[in-house]
Structure formats: C-alpha cells, structure tokens
Amino acid sequence: MHGIAQPVEGQSDLPNDVLAALKLRGEEGDSLYLYIRRQIRSSCGTDYDCLQMHYDEALTELERAFKHSAGILVAKEMLALAKKHEDTEQEEQALRRLISLYGFLRDFKADVFYRKQLITYYEETGNTKAAMYERARLLEGRVWYMEEAREVLPKLEAVLERASELGYTDIAHKLRIRLKYICEEFGMDDKLVEQIKALERISLSSPLDPSEYSIAFHAASGRADLFLKAGQYAQAEQYYRKALNVFKGGKKTTIKFG
C-alpha cells in the first residue's frame, strides 16, 4: 500500500506551467492532457507517489473547470499507474473518479464498463457489501439512461431484501432512498407510498446519528409530498418544516442527503 502525500490546503504542488495550462480557456481533451502528462512526468520522473499526487491535483482542477474530457484521460493514467504498482487503494479511487466523470457526461456504456471493473475489484478484495451496492447502482443506471424503471424496480427491491438479510443495513437504507427517487421521478405513486412508509418504519436515534439524517429527511419530505398531492396543506407544511429542520441539522455535520 502506498501513502500518497497530500498537498497543503490552499496551496498547490503542481508545477506552475501545469497550473497555467489548466487555466487556459479553450484547451481541452488530448492536447491539454498530453501537456499535463509531459510536464508532470518531467517534474516527478518515475517517482510513483509524486506522479499520483500531481495527477490527483490536476484532475481536481480539471473537474472544477468542467474539462471532463481531459480529466478522463488523467484518471485513466492514474488507473494504469495504480495497477502497475499494485496500489489497490488508488486503483479504487481512480475507478470511482472515472465513473463520476462518465456519469457527468451521461456516457452509460463507459459508466457500465468501469463500474463492472469496480465490482470485480471489490469481489477480488473480498468486499461483498461494496460489490452488492455497485451492482445495484449498475442496475439503477438502466433506470436513468434507458428509462427501464418498471423492469428494474423489482430487481433493485430484491437486492435491498438481500442486503437486509445479510445485515447490510446501511446499504439497505441507501437503496431504499434510491428507490424513492425512482418512484418519484417515474410517477410510480403506489410504490412511492411503500418506500416512504418503509423509511418511516426505520428506528432512529434521538438525537439523530449522523448516518440517519438522510433517512429522516427523505421520510419527512416524502410524507410532505404525499400530503401536498392530497391537498392536505397544513399537514404538508408540518412535514416540510420537519424535513427542513433535519436538513439544517444535517448540513452542520456535512451529511449528504442523496
């Protein structure tokens, strides 16, 4: 396992000419990537930790600038380096960033290709829980990219049930929220009510544990939406306020609600 040195917050360890190139408008794709790679290799030589650190920072800058085509090439370079040096931690991170980049570009085929690699990685490293969750996200991709919500929903429900049986409650709760999103987006009102009721039945701590904010938020906001649809405005307002209070509490702990 390699320990990649982290740059000091607020500072950049990238060579100045690389930073300048990243700030140029109009530069994209292969030309920008090749320039970045050449300059970083010139700065780091064959020092693996140095290469990964600079590529990581360059990729972050590219993401901030929405230069995703060049970012994908940098992430692929990071993945190839990690595999060459048998650095499993960096391999996982590079795969995740590639999935994120291709997801932003809505490239379903590439998303599937790298997510399958990530699933294989988890299987080979014995992380069955993570492999199960990524398989579910692979299925979910068919919902958003191919609009196969009704065909995929029973399969996702089966994964959720299996996660519950294995005691993977965190995965089960995440999937429950994902199912709620799907039912909302595709107007599956009968199933949506089921998902909201299931979220409401989850036993939560008082005060809420950080891992529970998302559950509480979606249970309350989902119930509020149902009241609103039914024209029960006072009850809807009550639950929207409840959801808002949960959201405010979660933001203080930097909790993600999706």
Image (spheres, rainbow, N blue to C red):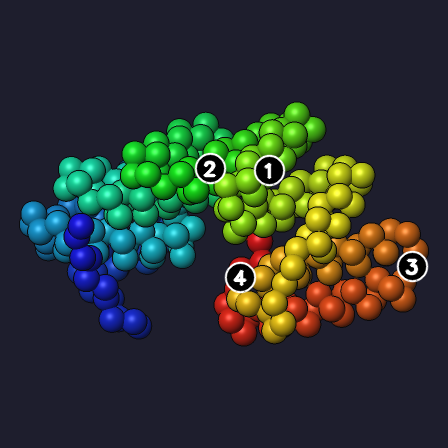
Q: Which residue is pictured at 14% across the width and 42% down the height?
A: 85
Give the number of the mark in front: 3 or 1. 1
* Residue placed under numbered mark 4 in the picture: 211
Q: CA distance from mark 1 to mark 4?
A: 20 Å
Q: Mark 4 and 3 residues: CB-CB less than 8 Å, in contact?
A: no
Amino acid type for the residue under numbered disc 4: Ser
Q: Which residue is pictured at 55% across the width and 36% down the height?
A: 162
Q: Is residue 42 left or right of residue 167?
A: left
Q: CA distance from mark 4 to mark 2?
A: 19 Å
Q: Mark 4 and 2 residues: CB-CB less than 8 Å, in contact?
A: no
Q: Is residue 97 left or right of residue 248?
A: left
State the image quarter where residue 217 is shown: bottom right
Label 1 sits on a secondary structure element that is helix
**Numbered label attached to residue 161:** 1
Instruction: Indicate whether 113 appears above or below 234.
Output: above
Q: Mark 3 and 1 residues: CB-CB less than 8 Å, in contact?
A: no
Task: Pick whichever of labels 4 and 3 is earlier in the sequence.
Answer: 4
Residue 16 x/y as whole percent: 19, 62
Q: Mark 1 and 4 residues: CB-CB less than 8 Å, in contact?
A: no
Label 2 crowd bin: few (<14), some (14–19), many (20+), radius 10 Å = many
Task: Pick whichever of labels 2 and 3 is earlier in the sequence.
Answer: 2
Q: CA distance from mark 1 to mark 2?
A: 12 Å
Q: CA distance from mark 3 to mark 1?
A: 33 Å
Give the number of the mark in front: 4 or 3. 4
- Residue 18 visible in image: yes
Amino acid type for the residue under numbered disc 2: Met
Label 4 crowd bin: few (<14), some (14–19), many (20+), radius 10 Å = some
**Numbered label attached to residue 232:** 3
